[in-house]
Amino acid sequence: MVTRSISLKGSWDRGHVYVRPIQRDLDLNPETAKNEHGEVVEEICNYCFNIFPMNQLREHIYVCPAKRKEDTGTRKEDTTVTFASEESNQHEVINVEEDEIPDTKPQCSEEIPQSDAVSRENTDFDMMYASLIFEDINADQFSDEQVDEDEEKPPAVVTSTGVLDIKDILEELATVNIDNQHISKFNICRSNIWDGVLRGMERKSFSPNKKVSVKFTDDVGLSEGAADLGGPMREFFTLALEKVLSGKLFCGQEHQKFLSYDAKALKQGEYFKAGQLFSMALVHCGIGPRCLSPILFDSMVKGPGEILVPIDSVYDPELQLGLQRLMSVQSVVDANKVIVDEKLQGILELSGTLRVMKSVCDVKEVSSETAHWYVLGRTRASFESFKNGLNCLGLLDALLHNPDSFRQTMCFHSQVLSSDIFEELFTVYRSEELSNRWELENKILAFWRDLLLDIEEKESEITFSDILFFASGLKVVPSRGISLELEFLHDPEKNGQLSNFPKSNTCSCVLYLPVTHSIYVEFKGAFTFAIRNAKGFGNP
């Protein structure tokens, strides 16, 4: 308990001043505010002299009988605490209302006698002590009712307890992080797309925050000349993700991808660039890999050391079979025989799990540790590099705070599209009602809907994904959503003839249907031919 005024040098600037008794040198860190037995710090009540844990002292002071008796007859008024300078007559004064935190705007005044400054020390300072120190040490034990409603609270951290819509998260990241005034350019050849990605990211002007501009070239190296208003960028991210996931940086089954370990690629920063590519694809375009193993995803969220790796997640078939046999043995003798038969000694030595096994439990532990090392341990360097790449555009922080929202776009999740759902993605633009063109469009729309039904019933050579890629440059509906348009080719081509094939504008996400076909079979054949033979940007 404070027994006299406190002197502060007059040269100090104005600011918050917190008063606490130096009864005990308290560490305000909640992790270290416990004694050696793990109990909460205890303090003595200076009214009744009983000892209480710090998390109960504040409440006790309000109801302490000894304090009530001492307060009887005491006039309730403002008390002024003076902090006198030892070298000058300038003073910082803090006015303290009873049961309130000190005012944060000190005012200059004349020096007040020491005896007056501490006339209510037994009341105000103990309340301040309990209020200030207790909240810091035991903040995690507070309920919402114990915190004053007017007290300023820190910004809330968004977590997965209330799952946020991935669309809202990505739109917020795009709004905050993307600079639409500057561009990062990529010159891409579809036959060697990963090389184009690396060249673009190594350019001095590259930044993941800048708007992406992509220019594709055909097989003879000529520019397609498309102005990038979104379509080339969407196709670029779609093809780039497919390429990197099927390349040397990842391994495993199609829908259960793990990071590999390639020393040369790691040295050249390719894992880091792959992480950047994933972040850019999600924030700029709204598409994710949709094929990472849940084990890899969970290791990014919780850390590799916290993840249990089942034996069947080992993607090397021979090693998986050997570890499964080792896991199923009934004795240590059988385990040693399996290690020899399956040639496991080398891999156990590399993983650091080879040791003397005295029981079947030891054998199972060795099997589990080896599986964990093979999947997550030996690739730790590439994992950390990839994770650092994900940190651009704020994606990693958003993923860590909202793992459930990102799981479907990072791990495999089958996107089921029906004919009705796919049709609703398009807004149809029609000619004037009852006009000749309008009548013609009615027939073509019927053909279009029949085609969607055939695709749904697996009676077509193309898929919904093929049409979506033809119209927008995307093979799945992105997490940020997409608006597609459906129009009709009433105007003749340069040769004066109407087109027999569909066209598209991937920048504006417009699909144009031909109106020259009088029967459904012709319409379906021409549409299928165009989709299967188009290289990009909807050109048949």
Image: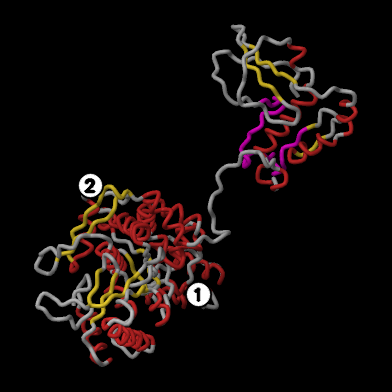
Instruction: List x then y, in percent, for residue 246.
Output: 29, 70
Instruction: List x then y, in percent, for residue 253.
Output: 37, 74
Q: Secondary structure under badge 1?
A: helix
Question: What distance separates the C-alpha of mark 1 from that of mark 2?
Answer: 53 Å
Q: Quadrant of the C terminus?
A: bottom left
Residue extending farthest to the top is 88
Instruction: List x then y, in percent, for residue 478.
Output: 38, 67
Q: Nearer the viewer, residue 380 or 216?
A: 216
Q: Which residues are magenta?
A: 19-43
Q: Nearer the viewer, residue 501 or 298?
A: 501
Q: Which residue is mark 1?
A: 327
Instruction: List x then y, in percent, for residue 288.
Output: 37, 65
Mark 1 vs 2: CB contact within 8 A? no
**Label 2 sits on what residue type?**
Ser
Tell me which corner region of the image, top left, top right, bottom left or bottom right, holds residue 31: top right
Q: Is residue 492 visible?
A: yes
Camera-near label (1 vs 2) is 2
Q: Quadrant of the N terminus?
A: top right
- Rendering colour mode: secondary structure
Q: Which residue is mark 2?
A: 205
Tell me which corner region of the image, top left, top right, bottom left or bottom right, holds residue 39: top right
Answer whether residue 30 is magenta in the image: yes
Does 523 appear above or below 37?
A: below
Q: Secondary structure under badge 2?
A: loop
Please name the residue shown 26% across and 48% down the image. 182
Q: Main secondary structure of the magenta part?
A: loop
520 vs 388, left or right, is left
Tell me which corner region of the image, top left, top right, bottom left or bottom right, holds residue 76: top right
Q: Is residue 374 visible?
A: no
